[in-house]
Image (cartoon, rainbow, N blue to C red):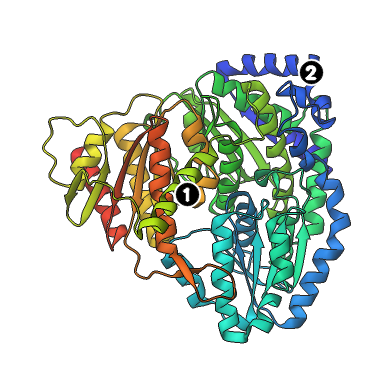
Amino acid sequence: MNDTAFYQEHLSADLGAAQAGVDAALTEMAAAHIVRRLWHKDYTIWRPQPTEISNRLGWLDMPDLLPTQFDDIRALVADVQQAGYTHVLLLGMGGSSLAPEVFAKTFGLHSPQPPTGFALDLAVLDSTHPDAVQAQADRLHPARTLFIVATKSGGTVETLSFFKYFYNWVADALGRENAGQHFVAITDPGSKLVAVAQQYDFRDTFLNNPHIGGRYSALSYFGMVPAALAGVDIDTLVQRAQAAARACRAATANPGAILGAILGELAKAGRDKATFVLPPELASFGDWVEQLIAESTGKDGTGILPVVGESLAAPAEYGDDRLFIVLNWVDDTRFDAALTALAAAGHPVVRLQLRDRIDLGAQFFIWEIAIAIAGYRLGIQPFDQPNVESAKVQARKMTAAYFETGKLPPARPAFTADEVTVYGDWPATRRPLRTPGDVLLDFLQQAQPHDYITQQAYIQPTPAADAAIAHLRSVLRHHTKLATTAGYGPHFLHSTGQLHKGDGGHGLFLQFTSEPQVDLPIPDEAGSPTSSMSFGVLIQSQVLGDFQALVDVHRRVIRFHLGADPVAALQHLAMALTNSQA
């Protein structure tokens, strides 16, 4: 079986009564020639005007265009190999960082199957928490580290802050005359970063196709440069993407069109919580697809909530708003019993199968097509992000106040106990509130069927924090039977943040902040010791800005400041929920 046929035949679905609606949607799409029009970049599929559509469809061409760019990428790989580099740290946010993280975790030196040839140790920094920045500085050696500064706009505040900090870090160790050679830029032509790269003598600059949005950029320089440096076989990866593109041109058995129709029609029928079931080896792909779905569909009062990283449970743990999507290896049966039980209980289940890791090249493209189609079925424009700016605007107001007064605007606590301070305004019950757990239980009284709960963790990402957040998710789901999601801030602002403000208002938002162990200055300019703001101030302004942006669109939000030991505080919150059910 050739690759194209494989991708057509290894998508299956058990949709029950919803199958008729999907079949009708596919018939309607065929009559309207939607697939053909998509490939002809017909913006009228989504809107009567081309704004932020015609200049966002360049991703359709990338499987065929990418091989023409590989010589430049290979030249960089050979260059850094000869120069003796061992590590590469990607500085980015959202669409600039998620695909590289897939390549690092799925193919990199610390993956289950590390590369056998030359590869740098690839990691991604997408947290402005000062402890997270310090952790990267502590583990890296300036002389052996390459930094990729990745931002489409060239003006992403987090990415430029990372660059300025690490430029000074390298310059202090190796001299300013050598520092620039430790940096590579990936950006759009004409962006601010192009001038920065020239000013600071970067080793290389890759100018991406400007007609590709960040979340659609996996199969472009933004994904391929870090992939090649991490030792990924980019030739085979793109060949699989080319095969998927051929499959997604087909009039029938088109995996992208079918998947998009399923997502759109099931969401319209109330199954708008797309719950992903992935083996641990593919977990990072879920984070990539999470942004693609959330930022593309979460607007105009609608949206599909991607649920990634939630543990698989018995049917009784779920409401009737779920669609289960399984990405797994051919002949892997580890999820079969659980999925059979879910289907028997009336939950729709979609299965996509992969032969090997390199099939992710195909999955990137299939999912991009699917979300473009799902947007059409939902009647939304999937290529803009109208609500993302709101949190940025509020964060800028917070930092402006800091520059004017020397401190961030004060927030009034609603509750303090056990070294945890709670901020927010919610309809309190008559329950005596003695502990942070009592407050969480009280806040959850607002939950309604078909709502979801999101943990927004503005804390340092660590394995211990991951485990504590995952455990609390399981307890929250068991307690409420609602879908749960989680993300580290400010990363999620560039991922699910659009859906949080743009959907129908079904979220309950739990913000978690912590007291950093260190704080680090952000240089005003790379190469200068002068600093007007620290990473601690930056992330706190982002916390306050996002909180206000949620309040402005009438979302239910509460913030728990967890003090110096956020992991222990999260564990105590989970214990309080568990004990309430005893």
Task: Give the mark nearer the N terminus: 2 vs 1.
Answer: 2
The residue singled out by tag 2 in the image is 30
Q: Is residue 313 visible?
A: no
C-alpha separation, residue under disc 2 versus residue under disc 1: 47 Å
Asked whether the beta carbons under mark 2 and mark 1 sit within 8 Å of each other, the answer is no
**In this picture, is 135 found above or below 222?**
below
Q: Is residue 10 left or right of residue 561?
A: right
Q: Is residue 278 left or right of residue 437?
A: right
Q: Nearer the viewer, residue 107 or 414?
A: 414
In the rendered view of the protein, which quadrant contains the C terminus?
top left
**In this picture, is 140 found above or below 23?**
below
Could you tell me which secondary element the residue under label 2 belongs to? helix
Could you tell me which secondary element the residue under label 1 belongs to? helix
- Determine crowd level at label 2: few under 14, some 14-19, many 20+ residues with C-alpha closer than 10 A: some
* Residue type at numbered disc 2: Ala
Location of residue 105 by image quarter: bottom right
Count up the numbered dots: 2
Residue at image point 70% right, 24% down: 46
**In this picture, is 173 found above or below 334?**
below
* Residue type at numbered disc 1: Arg
The percent coordinates of residue 536 (x first, y second) are 40, 62
Q: Is residue 125 visible?
A: yes
- Determine crowd level at label 1: few under 14, some 14-19, many 20+ residues with C-alpha closer than 10 A: some
Residue at image point 56% right, 83% down: 172
The percent coordinates of residue 472 (x first, y second) are 33, 47
The percent coordinates of residue 523 (x first, y second) are 52, 70
Between disc 2 and disc 1, the foreground one is 1
The residue singled out by tag 1 in the image is 396
Residue at image point 53% right, 58% down: 126
Residue at image point 75% right, 56% down: 221
